[in-house]
Amino acid sequence: MTVSSIAPGADRVVIFDTTLRDGEQSPGASMNLEEKLRVAEALEAMGVDVIEAGFPVASPGDFEAVKAIAERSSNSVICGLSRAKQADIARCAEAIRPAPRQRIHTFISTSPLHMKYKLQMEPEAVLQAVTDSVSFARSLVEDVEWSAEDGSRTEPDFLCRCVEAAIAAGATTINIPDTVGYAIPEEYAALIKGVMDRVPNTDKAIFSVHCHNDLGLAVANSLAAVRAGARQVECTVNGLGERAGNAAMEEVVMAIRTRHDTMPFVTGIKTEHITKISRLVSAITGFPIQPNKAVVGANAFAHESGIHQDGMLKHAGTYEIMTPESVGLSRSTLVLGKHSGRAAFRQKLAEMGYGDLGDNAVNDAFARFKELADIKKEVFDEDIAAIIDDTAMRAHDRIKLTSLEVRCGTVYRPPHAKMQLEIDGQTAETDAAGDGPVDAIFKAIRSLVPHDVVLELYQVQAVTKGTDAQAEVTVRLREDGKSVNGQGSDTDTMVASAKAYLHALNKLLVKRERQIPEGGTI
Ligand code: KIV
Ligand code: ZN
């Protein structure tokens, strides 16, 4: 894989998605193997150039996930992260080996603060590590990315020396991250341009940016850097990522597409996939999308005020700078109900971008749709997306909810939850009391599957409007310093709550099986 084959034209911006690596590092956002494969498949289908699939040395689970993604990949470059250590780099090369297109991404901190306190290394030793790590990576694969961690707070002279050394050692992509989300657009653009102008061998590499969103500037910084000469943007779906997250892929891509007049660049992203992948990542990680989130929020294309609605009726361009269709939202008025048959359901799935679902998945989803349509008069697109995600998420769970009866209200004090679970194929039942109905449900689960966790978050959202709307519940559990999110949806908020808790618990079980070796985290 050479630089020119990934970025054929000067105006082409390479989209490097790190949802599965930096995104997954976000507290609570961990995904299991099955979930990572689904996200990787969706990223590849939408035309992402480079998928950072994980950090192989971090744990056997991370290694297996990167390898499994590499095995199934075809067009996207599969990238693994590694510190500037031979063992990391070798492990990374092994994990990505099955991919037809492979990249090793190696990084080391270059800012005075990080070198002194985090690495406890002298600048000259860091410089040597850059050469050594990149040369070693380059001896294993052709496509090597080098990152200057905390690049935006690095002294420009030292940054230039590191970049020159990395390119001389064979790096084909140079990434200057704004690791702590500290940069502002003009300053960051000047830094990128300054390095590109000053380092003699910059024509041998693509410059990349990786911005965190601590000041809400990740997308603005990324775009400013592209205008200054960068041609790779590292980003995540829904802006998932450490702390305030990374630059949101959908925002970067739609800004470039919508403002081509002032940013004459192109990406290879099929933007019509944006809504679907955004929902998928939200459902899998249990991170709800805020309603006013740019591009993918529920209100992003909603026009509530009379003046706006009037303008929209006269000409959509009055208040709409991009069409809902361009991000994969259909304007379809085909609302399904209890009389809708399998053909209409299939048509709706195809319209929503789920045309590639296998027969079993369609049958399961259709059965749940019918149950829902019996309860709810109108079944909207959001309901169907919730059904598809909910069904797929639970396919490999070890613990499943088979029945739930809750007694509560003014008559039944204290509230009780009678529950039946299937645990590794065995049925178990209990009846538990709690301070409230949700507490009773969670206590019932704890008595059937004893575990010691902290409940960090319990949150309910309605999928659509109306009192018959499905509830989407998010539960975050913490065990041994690690958090996981679970989601569940149902028209019955109590059932959705039980499902969300079980989803999180199933993830914890998977997490327990993953051993993180000493020093394995970034
Ligand atoms: O934020 C950062 O600096 C990173 C690097 C590892 C690229 O995620
Ligand atoms: Zn990062």
Image (cartoon, rainbow, N blue to C red):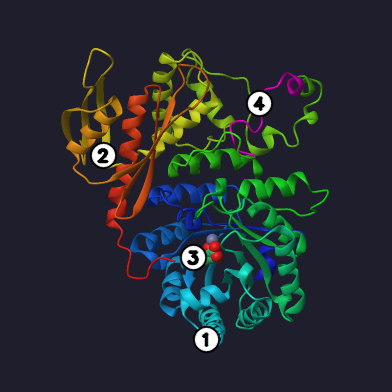
| Left or right: 339 as drawn, with respect to 400 | right
- The answer to whether the residue bearing label 2 lies less than 8 angstroms from the nearest atom of ligand 2 is no
Q: Nearer the viewer, mark 4 or mark 1?
A: 1
Q: Residues within 10 Å of mark 1 (few under 14, many from 20)?
A: few
Which residue is disc 4 drawn over? 331
Task: Give the image location of residue 49, x and y in percent.
Answer: 61, 57
Q: Earlier in the sequence, mark 3 or mark 2?
A: 3
**Label 3 vs label 1: CA separation?**
24 Å
**Label 4 vs label 1: CA separation?**
58 Å
Classify mark 4: helix, strand or loop: loop
Which residue is disc 3 drawn over? 80
**Label 4 vs label 3: CA separation?**
39 Å
Of the pair 514 and 343, the residue shown nearer to us: 514
Residue at 61%, 76% (x, y): give it. 171
**Residue 86 seen in this snapshot:** yes
Which residue is disc 1 drawn over? 125
Amino acid under disc 3: Gly
Residue 408, compared with residue 450, is above or below; it is above
Q: Residues within 10 Å of mark 3 (few under 14, many from 20)?
A: many
Q: Which residues are magenta?
A: 295-309
Q: Earlier in the sequence, mark 3 or mark 1?
A: 3
Q: Which mark is residue 399?
A: 2
Q: Residues within 10 Å of mark 4 (few under 14, many from 20)?
A: few
Of the pair 100 and 135, the residue shown nearer to us: 135
Residue 145, compared with residue 31, is above or below; it is below
